[in-house]
Image (cartoon, coloured by chain):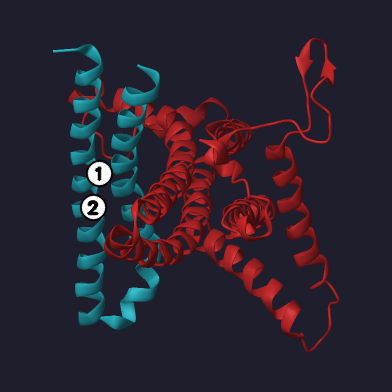
Chain colours: A red, B cyan
Amino acid sequence: MHQFTIEPMFGTDHWAIGGYNIAFTNSAMWMVLAAVVIWAFVALGMKRQLVPGRWQMAVETMTGFIDNLLSANVGPEGKKFVPYVFSLFMFILCANLLGLLPLGVIGSHAFTFTSHFTATGVLAILSFSIVLIVGFARHGFHFFSLFVPHGTPGWLLWLIPVIELVSFLVRPFSLGLRLFVAMMAGHILLEVLSSFVINSANAGPGWGLMIGVPSFLLMIGISALELLVAVIQAYVFALLTSLYINDAVNLH
Amino acid sequence: MDAEAAKLIGAGLAAIGAGMAALGVGNVFGSFLESALRNPGAADGQQGRLFIGFAAAELLGLLAFVVSMILIFVA
């Protein structure tokens, strides 16, 4: 489907390093755009006034939200991870919301790079490697006690660590897969509904009224739902990352 | 049966998984709302757990979607 194709932009399709193509794609452009939006959002709220204005209030609400999330899930140690989780949350949120922009009305089209497993998988690997690095740096090989929860009966010692290990190793996949599939499914749903509208309108006014109009009304509702999903998926990604960081910092 | 037809039937069957995940997600939010109305004071503190349950239930539906996508486009 055209909205998911990655294509080089601005004639950079021949750029390469060591045989690998490093063309500046539309995916990369929307990543840069998301980063610029976050930078502008935070920079405009960094005036540090004693009585915050509206913009500073918005920025402080977002940072305070992530700060609460980490202090509730990780405890006082979680303060160190606020910059990472905040950037992650805002990056995914901006990506999801920018991808929903109705740019089709001005002839261009938005690209949701979180609907590609390559992008979300890298974010998930980033979170997972932070968990591994923090866990081994803080606890050394004692980190492996994560796989033996408190109160495991002795005769189950052959089974529980295997289950815990599998559930630990599946985490990066489930983290990346959830975001990618949720975003892709929403966009495909909208595409299918819009094809209903177009095809039924082409088939004649009767079909257009019977199928096209209800499909269009449904599209409006689904678009509102997609806005909700965009926020929830960003929140779930940040929440699960903070839970995994809690495992690394506090070992169950 | 033609292999192509079997793939499409399998992809359709995978949609059952999406419906089952809908039951799961509805159950998570329904139970939360039910108990939140009984004890509204304790509800706000449990929102993190609500979304963990939501994420776990939703993931299985999304996996069903992945299975159908693999059957249609990859296999």
Please state which of residues B16 and A45 is positioned toward the viewer in this rendering. Answer: B16
What is the chain identity of the residue bearing mark 1? B
What is the chain identity of the residue bearing mark 2? B
Using the rendered image, report if marks 2 and 1 lie on a common chain.
yes
* Label 2 secondary element: helix
Residue marked by disc 1: B18
Query: Residue most toward the top?
Result: A19
- Image coordinates of residue B15 in percent, x first then y, are 23, 39
- Image coordinates of residue A222 in percent, x first then y, are 39, 61
Q: Residue at 44% of width from left, 66% of height from top? A: A224
* Label 1 secondary element: helix
Residue marked by disc 2: B22
Q: Residue at 21% of width from left, 26% of height from top? A: B10
Q: Residue at 63% of width from left, 68% of height from top? A: A62
Number of marks in picture: 2
Please state which of residues A178 and A125 is positioned toward the viewer in this rendering. Answer: A178
Label 2 and label 1: CA atoms lie apart by: 6 Å
- Other-residue count near label 1 (Cα within 10 Å), few / some / many at <14 / 14–19 / ≥20: some
- Image coordinates of residue A63 in percent, x first then y, are 66, 67
- Image coordinates of residue A31 in percent, x first then y, are 71, 45
- Other-residue count near label 2 (Cα within 10 Å), few / some / many at <14 / 14–19 / ≥20: some
Q: Quadrant of residue A252?
A: top left
Please state which of residues B43 and A79 is positioned toward the viewer in this rendering. Answer: B43
